[in-house]
Image (spheres, grey):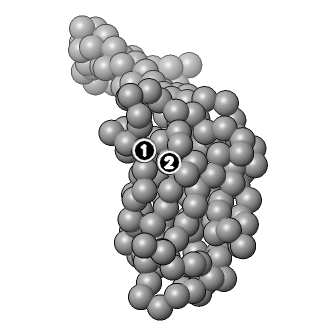
Amino acid sequence: MKANRKFINADERAVSAVIGVILMVAITVAIAATVYVYVSGMIGGTKKMAPTVQFTKDETTDRITVATTDSGVPWTSLSIRSSAAVKYFVNGEVTLVIGRTLAADTLQPIVAATDIQGGVVVNIQGSDFIDIESQAAAPGSTDVTITLVHSDTNSILQTVVFTSIATIVT
């Protein structure tokens, strides 16, 4: 019985009921905000996936050919990088107006929107190709690495190495 008396005789100062409610609401809001931030980070937006585009190289013709591709992948979404200065043509300039020079170790769009005939979006299809010609002063540049990149996701689609590329014949 004496143990209960200690609480009765104790100093009766406490937080008022209004302040107690305000503190409880503040704590609840803080916890809700923390849970929201945590959950929204987990859900996030859907990440853009790089398309599947497979290329094959032909060392004798200095050509990279599209073997397979997802449907609806436009040429304007691809970029190219080369370890040496080259000139490249897409589909022999039949489908696309292009014959661009690429400086060594620079990344540039394969096809700019202004390169497309009539402004129509041209999608990549199987058997499309990219012809590569050397810009080097000496014929037969050796070990030229070509990297094809999906620009929207900055993902490397494929890297091919040519042991020699013919010099441009003018």
- Tag 1 and tag 2, C-beta contact below 8 Å: yes
What is the secondary structure assignment of the residue under circle 2?
helix
Q: Point out which mark residue 10 bears.
A: none
State the residue at coordinates (49%, 61%).
88
Q: Tell me where residue 47 sits by quadrant.
A: top right
Quadrant for the C terminus in the image: bottom left
Label 2 crowd (10 A; few <14 / some 14-19 / many >=20): some
What is the secondary structure assignment of the residue under circle 1?
loop
Q: Position of residue 137 (x, y in %)?
A: 42, 88
Amino acid tagged 1: Val
State the residue at coordinates (51%, 79%).
167
State the residue at coordinates (71%, 73%).
59
**Looking at the image, residue 109 lies above or below residue 107:** above
Measure the alpha-carbon separation of dots 1 and 2.
Answer: 5 Å
For mark 1, what is the residue?
Answer: 97
- The residue at the far front in this view is 170
State whether residue 125 appears in this view: yes
State the residue at coordinates (31%, 20%).
26
Along the viewing direction, whichever of 52 and 90 lies nearer the viewer? 90
State whether residue 42 appears in this view: no
Q: Position of residue 55 (x, y in %)?
A: 70, 55
Amino acid tagged 2: Glu
For mark 2, what is the residue?
Answer: 93
**Looking at the image, residue 56 lies above or below residue 73:** below
Along the viewing direction, whichever of 97 and 113 lies nearer the viewer? 97
Label 1 crowd (10 A; few <14 / some 14-19 / many >=20): some
Along the viewing direction, whichever of 8 and 162 lies nearer the viewer? 162
- The residue at the far bottom in this view is 138
Q: Where is residue 125 in the image (x, y as percent from the top left)?
A: 66, 38
**Looking at the image, residue 61 lies above or below residue 155:** below
Please indicate whether residue 147 sits to the left or right of residue 16 in the image.
right
Q: Position of residue 83 (x, y in %)?
A: 49, 77
